[in-house]
Amino acid sequence: MRPIVRVEGNVGTMMLIGQFDFNLHKDFRQASQELLDNGAVQEIRVDFDQVPFLDSSALGMLLLLKERAAAQKKTMVLINCHEAVMQVFEIACFNKMFTIRQAG
């Protein structure tokens, strides 16, 4: 399912739904571009609340988005990560490369 993009003030949120893997590549890129092209957006949040699983291609997509956001002086935050997703992030050292905020 295509990510849901929402912009509130200077924060753009991309809500991912379902497995985050290579099959989502095209839709993720389109949603990312929508947030990158929006001049009002200064912080991009990727919401993992509805993501039970992600694979290595998802990690690559996140790294690319982080790089592209930084080139535009936008920050990027990963939010609402469940335990299985956090374990993947910790193994890949994403907890050191990204700001990760839990719900609440």
Image (cartoon, rainbow, N blue to C red):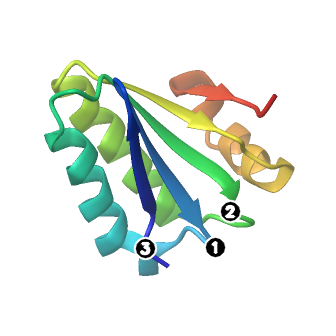
> In this image, 92 relative to 90: left or right?
left
Q: Mark 3 or mark 1, which has the lower sequence index? A: 3
Q: CA distance from mark 2 to mark 1?
A: 5 Å
Question: Any mark on residue 9, and which?
Answer: none
Disc 1 residue type (three-letter): Gly
Residue depicted at x 34% and y 71%: 27
Residue on which disc 2 sits: 51
Residue depicted at x 44% and y 81%: 23
Q: Residue 15: image x %, image y %?
A: 53, 55
Disc 2 residue type (three-letter): Val
Q: Is there CB contact under 8 Å for labels 2 and 1?
A: yes
Q: CA distance from mark 3 to mark 1?
A: 10 Å
The furthest residue to the top: 73
Q: Residue 5: image x %, image y %?
A: 40, 54
> In this image, 81 relative to 45: left or right?
right
Residue on which disc 1 sits: 18
Q: CA distance from mark 2 to mark 3?
A: 13 Å
Q: Compare residues 21 and 10 and report the one nearer the observer.
A: 10
Residue on which disc 3 sits: 2
Q: Residue 48: image x %, image y %?
A: 64, 51
Disc 3 residue type (three-letter): Arg
Q: Is the residue marked by circle 2 packed among few (<14), some (14-19), or many (20+) residues within 10 Å?
A: some
Q: Is the residue marked by circle 3 packed among few (<14), some (14-19), or many (20+) residues within 10 Å?
A: some
Q: Quadrant of residue 100?
A: top right
Q: Is there CB contact under 8 Å for labels 3 and 1?
A: no
